[in-house]
Image (cartoon, rainbow, N blue to C red):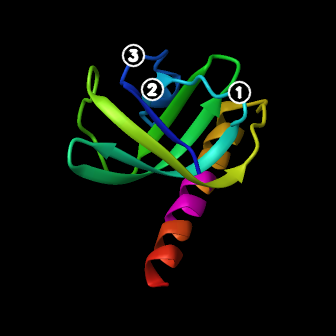
Amino acid sequence: MAIFTGIVQKGGKRAAALGYPTINIPLTDRDVSGIYAARVKVGEEEYEAAAYADQKKKVLEAHLLDFSKDLYGWSVKIQLVKKIREYKKFTSEKEQRKAIDGDIASVRAYFMNKDKK
């Protein structure tokens, strides 16, 4: 799938407020949208992530699994490897958190099963 490169920018901190901090880079590809399992390369390190291609804001957000460093200003590569689902609007924060938890579980399961093959 597609690989996107960009400098990590500050976002609206909405995902972080929900408990899922993300890195954000500009999104120029109009053909991707929704939630993906992704690999994020930072320097020589690579991390598994749940990514969200937001066509409305033209941003690609990635929540790096088991990661907590500040990456503002860093150059990163985000490779979308498997689409999990399409974007959905939620009526409550509780419903959104539940969906994000499910997305992260799906991403973890994808990488766990992929690594066994």
Q: Is residue 117 visible?
A: yes
For this view, does 23 lie left or right of residue 73?
right
For this view, does 55 lie left or right of residue 6?
right
User: Are the residues tagged 2 and 3 within 8 Å (C-beta)?
Assistant: yes
Mark 1 residue type: Arg
Q: Quadrant of residue 88?
A: top right
Report helix, strand or loop for mark 1: loop
Query: Which residue is identified by label 3?
Result: 10
Q: Which secondary structure dominates the residues rendered in magenta? A: helix
What is the x, y in percent for residue 24?
45, 26
What is the x, y in percent for residue 91?
79, 30
Distance (Cα) linking label 2 and label 3: 7 Å
Query: Which residue is identified by label 2?
Result: 24
Report helix, strand or loop for mark 2: strand
Mark 2 residue type: Asn
For label 2, count other residues whose C-alpha is less than 10 Å away and answer few (under 14), some (14-19) or many (20+): many
Q: Tell me what residue is drawn at x 50 percent, y 64 percent.
A: 108
Query: Which residue is identified by label 1?
Result: 30
Distance (Cα) linking label 2 and label 1: 16 Å
